[in-house]
Image (cartoon, grey):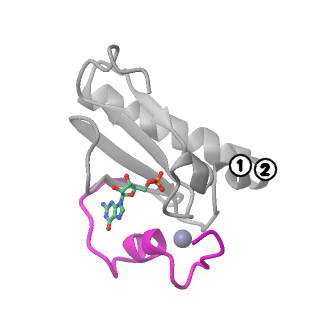
Amino acid sequence: SEDQGSDTCLFCKIIDGQVPSSKVFEDEAVYAFNDIEPKAKVHVLVVPKHHYRNVDEVAKADPELLAHMVDVSQKIADEAYLGQFRLVFNTGEQAGQTVFHAHAHVLTGEDLSASHT
Ligand code: 5GP
Ligand code: ZN
């Protein structure tokens, strides 16, 4: 739920290795892993290691971290598909956010130009 703390947060557990994941990239600030239910040929979640509830919290608390998440997303797409990608931040339950630890959906690996969602 919205008020889920970092102690019970699924993505904090993934970052800690308590819940297994398929790692794509990691550095001191972010962890990136394959989405368990991919919506494109390549669907990676880029998450800050610090627990923020959504992208707006990241932007306000640490704008350089948000820029870094975009840079990591670009590098994933550089390797996966021509450097081209869709970046999605679901923010709030009504927008489809289900995990309240900020994450970027990086959708790439194929031509997505026909699906504008
Ligand atoms: P949201 O709907 O909050 O924007 O995105 C959450 C994403 O996390 C969904 O795309 C969902 O498939 C993914 N997800 C949920 N649980 C797990 C999990 O245990 N492992 C992985 N790798 N992805 C997950
Ligand atoms: Zn968390």
Do labels 2 and 1 touch, CB within 8 Å?
yes
**Quarter of the view holding residue 68:** top right
**Stretch in magenta:** 1-26
Task: Pick whichever, 35 or 117, lies toward us.
Answer: 117
Which residue is nearer to you in this view: 112 or 75?
A: 112
> Is the shortest distance between ligand 1 and the CB of mark 1 under 8 Å?
no
Q: Position of residue 34 (x, y in %)?
A: 28, 52
The Cα–Cα distance between marks 2 and 1, rounded to whole angstroms, is 6 Å
Circle number at residue 60: 2
Q: Nearer the viewer, mark 2 or mark 1?
A: 1
Magenta stretch contains residue 11: yes
Residue 78 is left or right of residue 9, and the answer is left
Residue at (26, 73) in percent of width and height: 20
- Which quarter holds ligand 1? bottom left
Residue 61 to residue 80: above or below:
below
Q: Is residue 107 above or below residue 59?
A: above
Of all residues, the one furthest to the front in this rendering is 94
Q: Residue under label 1, please give it.
A: 56
Asked which quadrant contains residue 114, the reply is: top left
Is 2 displayed left or right of 98 in the figure?
A: right
Residue 114 shown in magenta = no
Which residue is at 26% across, 52% downward?
37
Q: Residue at x 45, y 40 (%)?
A: 72
- In the picture, measured across the screen, residue 36 lies left or right of residue 83, that is left
All told, the count of numbered labels is 2
Graded by Cα atoms within 10 Å as few (under 14), some (14 to 19) or many (20 or more), the crowding at tag 2 reads few
The extreme top residue here reads: 113
Element marked by disc 2: helix
Q: Residue 52 appears at what percent x and percent y? A: 64, 63
Q: What kind of residue is marked 2? A: Lys
